Amino acid sequence: MNGDMSSAELPKDWGTADVVVQGVVGPVGRYGNLGACRRVINVMKVLQISNKRGFSDK
């Protein structure tokens, strides 16, 4: 995935969020770690961010 996703980043070390983006889906291929992803997304705009849940083991 490409594009500016900084607005969706969580303030803690890691966690999850529901993110809606506008972008272009790339061609079918093998992407990511060990080719586990079939497509890439070129993000043009972050439309909505909700349900941010930061987790910490501290």
Image (spheres, rainbow, N blue to C red):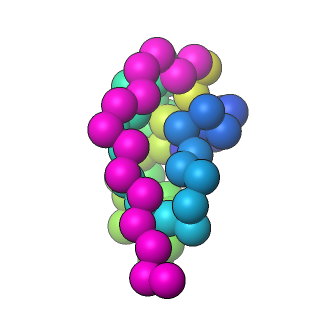
Residue 42, position as x, y percentages in the image: 57, 31
Q: Which quarter of the rendering shows the N terminus? A: top right
Nearer to me, 19 or 58: 58
Range of residues picked out in magenta = 45-58
Find out whether residue 47 is within the magenta segment: yes
Can residue 35 be seen here? The reply is no
Q: Residue placed at 43% from the left, 82% from the top? A: 57
Residue 31 drawn above or below residue 28: below
Residue 33 drawn above or below residue 49: below
> Which residue of the protein is positioned furthest toward the bottom in this rendering?
58
Q: How many marks?
A: 0
> Which residue of the protein is positioned furthest toward the front in this rendering?
58
Can residue 31 be seen here? The reply is yes
Q: Residue placed at 54% from the left, 50% from the top? A: 10
Nearer to me, 54 or 4: 54
Q: Residue placed at 40% from the left, 66% from the top? A: 55
Residue 21, position as x, y percentages in the image: 45, 24
Q: Quadrant of residue 4?
A: top right
Nearer to me, 35 or 18: 18
Residue 44 drawn above or below residue 57: above
Q: Residue placed at 56% from the left, 61% from the top? A: 12
Find out whether residue 55 is within the magenta segment: yes
Residue 50, position as x, y percentages in the image: 35, 31
Residue 36, position as x, y percentages in the image: 37, 67
Examine the residues drawn in magenta and state their main secondary structure. Answer: strand
